[in-house]
Amino acid sequence: MIELEGQGAIDRPLFTVEPWCVREPELRLDRLAQTESVFALSNGHVGMRGNLDEGEPHGMPGTYLNSFFEQRPLPHAETAYGYPEQGQTVINVTNGKVIRLLVDDEPFDVRYGRVHHHERNLDMRAGTLSRHVEWTSPADKTVKVTSVRIVSLTQRAVAAICYEVEPVDEAVRIVAQSELVANEALPGGGKDPRASAILESPLVGEEHVANGTKVLLLHRTRQSGLRMAAGMSHDIQGPDSTTVETESSKDVGRLTVATRLEPGQKLRIVKYIAYGWSSQRSRPALHDQVVGALAGARRTGWGGLLAEQRAFLDEFWEGADVEVDGDAEIQQAVRFSMFHVLQAGARAERRMIPAKGLTGPGYDGHAFWDTETFVLPVLTYTLPGAAADALAWRHMTLPLACERAVQLGLEGATFPWRTIRGQECSGYWPAGTAAFHINADISDAVLRYLDATQDLQFEREIGLDILVQTARLWRSLGHHDVGGVFRIDGVTGPDEYSAVVDNNVYTNLMARRNLQEAAEMAMRHPDVADRLGVDAEEAASWRDAAAAMLIPYDERLGVHPQSESFTHHARWDFAATKPDHYPLLLNYPYFDLYRKQVVKQADLVLALHLCGESFTEEEKVRNFAYYEGLTVRDSSLSAQTQAVVAAEVGQLELAHDYLGETALVDLHDLNRNTRDGLHIASMAGAWSGLVAGFGGMRAGDGRLRFAPRLPGGISRLAFRMLYRGSRVKVTVTAESAHYELLDGPGLKLWHHGEPVTLGDEPVELPIEPIPARPAPAQPTGREPAPRRIDPHGR
């Protein structure tokens, strides 16, 4: 079936709820752009949106190469010193997904004729997107079309499609056109600042070649000077009368297959696609790279590519799977989320992990702090090599961060708020340049990775350099006041509804850790520290600043203000705010938001999670309750943090509600912008909400700690993770936690504060119930959707 816009289907679920796949049982043209994001395939280097094989209809065409971008001017209403002048925008590169089909001269187009059956399925164990269609043309000829698409996790440059056509009841003439298409027309981005800039024809053709079943196109960008190549090669099986022709022009390469199929016959086309790009390599070198990648893919063959993909994912799931009993939607969502987090970083290999991965052009394809704070924890404990690669990319951009610090009159490094190549691309400085916490976020991710892996080489070659330069930033950004207290004034914390404030608690706590650990690491590696120019006096100044760091506290309310004087501001009038006026940033001036107590996303609450050792249990309870009443979750990053901390303070049902919001953000299109790409960091929150929330997992200083407790709607939770070479499995029920060492050396862990040695034999320990506490209230109309309904309908 096919569902057209305006037929009342919007309230029906798009996907079936199944544990290992996302299946769309019928095509919904009104939700096409959303499903293109959901069905995107990627390996961190190449990304392909889940567009229909024939290219039309589409919501938003999209094929992306990690870090391949075009420059554009950043306009400012008024220029000022330090404003970035150039933006960077991800571009839709040459599309290799297209296979057009003609049935007795009628184009196969789901908008015409009759679609009897249309199903797509994202298989998270096989790593494939499959499609099954039965269609009758306007001329009353019926065919079955089956396609399977893959972006290889083992052959980084390669994607492939197996496309099959067969007649249903009578002979048909079939023409299939496999294409490479550059400079596709794209829909407009609208006025939403979260959408991307649209650049017309960003690629300039340099070479096109057609030979046998191979076609190759080479292009360069007009402004950024990047060069890319895309190629395709084919294996074709059909009747003996089948003919094949190829042709190419600067923006289109085409292989045309023509045949006649009798009932019982089938045309099968295996299309191998390869990509390469570089800012430095020559046109012949890229040409040869793509030819070589195609040769390797054809040698492996379609069956070999599928087998490699399955083996890669089997190994990943064996060490990373999360099992949830009692909430089938969350079970599907956490695997879907982990699959896309894996796709975003598996083969990025010293390139960034954008906020949307490679699933769409939202936020111009930029990377933010989302990567280090929300995405990398998942990879650090499941696929640590991918986390190391993402941090190595940050290290590669460190010279640019140091240049930016000099421009701002600071020492050390100022990492960009949003970027593709390492330069600052945020034109709105209060929420961009002033959000200095990203420097501590990156350092925190380095420390988390080193704690989990004990990777000494990484520490010496990458980690210390990052920590030293960020520590220098904090020491020059802050100052000791007349009382000797170290202050960091005029910054923007995670909550972008409070900008340019003094002593943001999250920023100061993270900076304190950054300063302390930089000094300690410099002592461990005096030779590297000497090379970086760190002497004893500088390291001592970092310790002094950390020890004197101001952490504001409101004695009157008994809570930590998000920043100094925040709790003295007037509260936002939530009761008078209409439901359709969220997100507030699209309906109210920032000036009004900045001077009120209203929180876009968890800020102080994020400090409770990432810097939990800095708060007592009572402080966590009071702080969480206070900020629940102010947080509107206009950012998709918020719910996962609220889920984790709600679980820690005993609000288990509320934590379950927030888990549903972060885990289902794209499967349910909760923010109505999944069309622009998936919310990779929010999806990572599905893992965090379960493992760090209900599993109570915390790690640091060589200690792996768990404090598990489950909400009523989840009867069993099991997850696997890697820590210091040991793979452990944790299984939680309402009454007990079961800890098992799957492989690696034994290790010591903590269960609700009690040390446990885990060796050859599993350990099972009881879970004591947590005291009941009053449920906190959220702003009017901003309560999370409940995951459970009690017998009385509450």
Image (cartoon, rainbow, N blue to C red):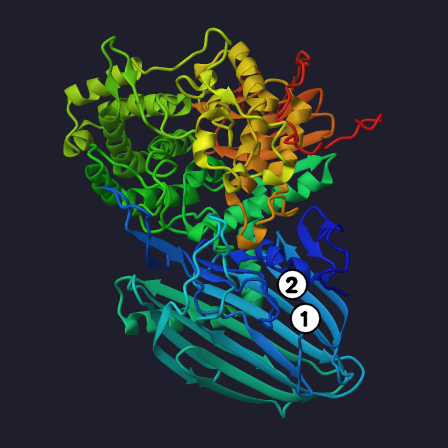
Rendered residue at 54%/29% (across/down): 641
Q: Identify the amino acid type marked 1.
A: Thr
Residue 743 visible somewhere in the drawing: no
* CA distance separating discs 1 and 2: 7 Å
Rendered residue at 62%/40% (across/down): 580
Q: Identify the amino acid type marked 2.
A: Ser
Residue bearing the label numbered 2:
130
The tag on residue 146 is 1
Q: Is residue 715 left or right of residue 686?
A: right
Q: Quadrant of the C terminus?
A: top right
Q: Are marks 1 and 2 in contact (CB under 8 Å)?
A: yes
Secondary structure under badge 2? strand
* Nearer to us in this view, 520 or 191: 191
* Nearer to us in this view, 163 or 719: 163
Residue 738 visible somewhere in the drawing: yes
Q: What is the x, y in percent for residue 634?
A: 54, 37
Q: What is the x, y in percent for residue 353?
A: 43, 47
Q: From this view, report whether residue 286 is shown above or below residue 670.
A: below
Secondary structure under badge 1? strand
* Nearer to us in this view, 68 or 416: 416
